[in-house]
Image: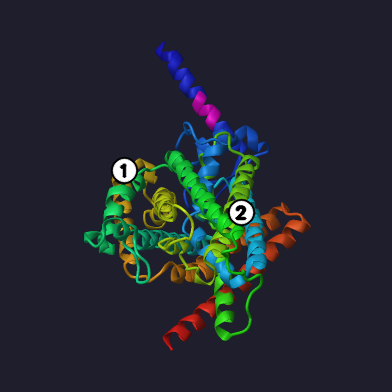
Amino acid sequence: MGSNCKFIELQQHNDIESLENQSESKNFGNGYVEAKSTDDDEFDDIGDFLVRNGGGKRDGGSGISGAVFNLSTSIIGAGIMALPATMKVLGIVLGFLLIVLMGIVSEISVEMLVRFQALVKADSYGEVVQAALGRPMRILSEFCIIVNNAGVLVVYLIIMGDVMSGSFNHMGVFDQLFGNGIWDQRKLVILVVVVAFLAPLCALDKIDSLSLTSAASVALAVVFVVVACAITFIKVVGGRVEPPRLAPDFGSKRAILDLLVVIPVMTNAYICHFNVPPIYNELKGRSPEKMNRVGRITTVVCVVIYAFTAISGYLLFGRGTEADILTNFDQNLGIRFSSTLNYIVRVGYILHLILVFPVVHFSLRQTVDALVFEKSAPLTESRKRCLLLTVVLLGLIYFGSTMIPNIWTAFKFTGATTALFLGFIFPALIALKLGGERDALSNGEKMLSWFMLVMAVIISFIGVIGDIFSLKSQSE
């Protein structure tokens, strides 16, 4: 019996060595190799076993619905709250067209990323960048992920504080319900939320564990959209809505500055690319085609939610639309049950952000770990390191939320810089580099990649210039 077991073990060892010899590989120096095989489908699962740091096949994984929920949650966060304010600047027609256009371009860039992630068998966004562009660019991409995601999470906490404790011009939910009290201390309220609600969810070490919370968060976002649209419809029918702006205003220096700043805010709304690799890796029976289906369903869902939210929010509050539209829901809406609807909208969306927060935090923690602890074991194998990173990051994000004045400031900066790099510049460069080396891109795809790259660079330049002049005008 013992000799039979030894024979089986030896045979398995020989089979694995044989497979390794059949597949050419190129080491990129970051713990994974690029596997080249004549039959990628045949060796996909075995290649994962050989390539990924000695680990075996993953158990379980998420289906298409779970992946759609996780990807949608990565997109639909605080950015949706700033979209009605972009409509106020761009006008309904141009604003709607940009929502659709940016959704389509973002989905194309996601498909490019998935295609070349599968080609080089990478586990993370940074690994795909390194395979195509080298280690220095990988470090730059990981820095962009850290800045972008940390900025987004800071925005989430700012919104939670503004809605629950109030801001300079708006009353908070607690003030309206209970009057003045300890809950007026915005920093204390945010700290309680971080410790009691966010920390337990952020401590989870697999993104697939967040599928149910992601589904709940998307459902809450839909509730917000339905309620906002219903209120707007009632007021439009009753003729109680001011005539909306259909096109941008070029009549003043201030209006032009707002226009320059608002376009990067719009591009920021679809950035989810940092979470695409882990979602793809945890997809059951994964393939680029299956992940593309996930991306396209997600894009349709997000475009619909974004369009309805932006238009209904702008029609509802007109020129008084705030950068964070949730703060507008502290006033009498002029319809029956106005107070109740206000509470439903604000409390529901705070719950949505609480459920979205850990999904964005997941990719932030993974990126910081890859950058700081590159030579260490995978984060899933070190619970202590996972918890330590979670605590440190939550502490820094909380501190940031007490320093940044409002969400518009954060979105202007990340939208013009890191978001454009992650969503468009890096995917286009990856496609042009790897696709050019292997003749994997058609002429049309090359033109599309160049268009995406040039578009992102122009928007980034315009956005940065607009941010500088905007800050200068505010200081004056």
Left or right placement of residue 209 versus residue 178 in this view? right
Q: Mark 1 sits on what residue? A: 383
Q: Is residue 243 above or below residue 10?
A: below
Q: Nearer the viewer, residue 1 or 75?
A: 75
Q: Position of residue 234 (x, y in %)?
A: 56, 55
Mark 2 or mark 1: name the one nearer the start of the chain.
2
Count neighbours of disc 1 (C-alpha within 10 A) and say few if under 14, some if 14 to 19, many if 20 or more: few
Residue 430 image-quadrant placement: bottom right
Q: Is residue 331 above or below residue 356?
A: below
Q: Nearer the viewer, mark 2 or mark 1?
A: 2
Residue 265 image-quadrant placement: bottom right
Q: Which residues are magenta?
A: 12-16
Q: Position of residue 427 (x, y in %)?
A: 60, 58
Q: Nearer the viewer, residue 251 or 192?
A: 251
Q: Mark 2 sits on what residue? A: 303
Image quarter of the C terminus: bottom left
Residue 253 image-quadrant placement: bottom right
Under mark 2, the amino acid is Val
